[in-house]
Amino acid sequence: MKDKKPRRTVPRVPRGFRDLPPEVVATRRRMIDTVCRVYERYGFTPLETPAVEYLDCLGKFLPEADQPDGGVFAWRYDDDDWVALRYDLTAPLSRYVAENFQELGTPFRRYQVGQVWRQEKPGPGRFREFTQLDIDVVGAGSMLADAEVACVIAEAIEALGVPRGSYEVRMNDRKVLNGLLEKVGCTPERAVRVLRSLDKIDRVGPEGVRDLLGPGRVDPSGDAMEGAGLEPAQIDRLLAFLGAPDDRQGYLRAIGELVSGTKDGDAGLAEMTELDQILTERGVGDDRVRFSAAIVRGLAYYTGPVLEVVLTFPVEGEGGKTQPFGSVAGGGRYDGLVGRFLGQQVPSTGASIGVDRLLAALQALKKLPARPGRCPVLVTTIEAPHRAEYQKMAAELRAAGLDVELYVGSGGVAKQFKYADRRGFTVAVVAGGDELGKGEVAVKDLRQGVEQSQAIGDRAEWLKTLPGQVTVPRERLVATVKEFLARYADAS
């Protein structure tokens, strides 16, 4: 009996995760660099924290934290305590600040980019691992800090090429929401479920929210969603709140009528009134930062102003319907998060950009940054006896500050040019025994060569003219390559 062949492992990615190809990684890096430059102009400094944190340090603040798994990937560590992959970058920041509070001083302004993980139901465009790009101001209780975060995020969005009129920073206040819940007679036990329901207004619409506030609903996938069990009169008042005007003055008037007379409601209105004054002083109008009662934010640690950045340009949604692109960033004030460790309140505020979501928006707007990270120059290695010279040429070009790849595969010149075409090189350096014997080297402008060869129908003519290629003395190699690259400097 013949032995069975060993079963091959099937290459596959776990559900809710994905691979990112080189061109996406390179483009995303350029986008992140653009945003970080804006952050640094405002005095924010970079920070890195580990992907794994003790579970009690992270805390249970996710929208679905009442579920058995808490929405996180957790396991027991070697010291027998529970640890988890971070679900955002803010909770680890609060732990870092608490550990280094005396040395840091306040306000502490930091930005951070990193992967986060949530054990949530995956779906189209919704993954269990994603990248966030955060800014935070820790130790600042003034509304100046909240206004600063809103303005920095707006400037970062514009720096990426999103024009005014195609985005809005929308702000609300958790204290205003708490005052509303008190006004409608919502018990503290129901408050989290009610806020979570209100936060779904963009996804399920007013009638969907009505169901969630009442008996519950079944989502399109067939999953049953428990309702908050409110009475119709309570629901009507909450929906009226969501429908308040979103210009700043209209918001302040309408919300004042709905929440005034409650401690939290009056405090929230005072904060939003001061925010409006600060934004006006900075010359920031409703075209950039608006107030919106529909902004709730699902995380439970928010204590004051909250914000979302919404891209308003139209895209084709499910079923071919046109709809605004939607949210790409969010955040708010969290005055109690650091205090969990220190036993004293440390006022803090910040915002987080969803990197992949924003990248998709830039793609829809055709505003993707030029791709970095792709070597523009290929040094071919067409004849083995001259290997040392090829390596020397590549080293000279790199020493001149150019990005250069030395071809390390096998195959002749045809295969190497096919490789260059597939990878999108701008310039190729070609030198065989004949050229090197004369002290020369050929430099080929690959972009121009493609354009010229399309106009040449005869192969013999193409071989004779060698479109886009020049032969120069060996000592002119670096200068010639730089001249070729300079033709495309503006485009890159």
Image (cartoon, helix red, strand yellow):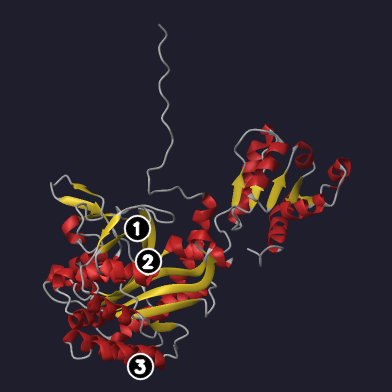
Q: Position of residue 110 (x, y in %)?
A: 33, 71
Q: Tell me which label, 3 or 2, sits earlier in the chain.
A: 2
Q: Position of residue 223 (x, y in %)?
A: 31, 53
Q: Tell me which label, 1 or 2, sits earlier in the chain.
A: 2
Q: Between tags 3 and 1, which lies in front?
A: 1
Q: Between tags 3 and 2, which lies in front?
A: 2
Residue type at the position of mark 3: Gln
**Mark 2 neighbour density, 10 Å: few (under 14) some (14–19) many (20 or more):** some
Instruction: Return the mark for residue 219.
Output: 1
Please report the residue visible at 80 percent of the width from the left and 42 percent of the height from the top. Answer: 438
Please report the residue visible at 76 percent of the width from the left and 36 percent of the height from the top. Answer: 433
Instruction: Return the mark for residue 204.
Output: 2
Residue situated in front as seen by the camera: 317 or 366: 317
Residue type at the position of mark 2: Val
Please report the residue visible at 21 percent of the width from the left and 76 percent of the height from the top. Answer: 335
From the viewer's perspective, tell me whether residue 89 is left or right of residue 339.
Answer: right
**Mark 1 neighbour density, 10 Å: few (under 14) some (14–19) many (20 or more):** few
Q: As displayed, is residue 421 above or below residue 268?
A: above
- Residue under label 3, please give it: 277
Q: As displayed, is residue 456 above or below residue 239?
A: above
From the viewer's perspective, tell me whether residue 105 is left or right of residue 360.
Answer: left
Q: How many marks?
A: 3
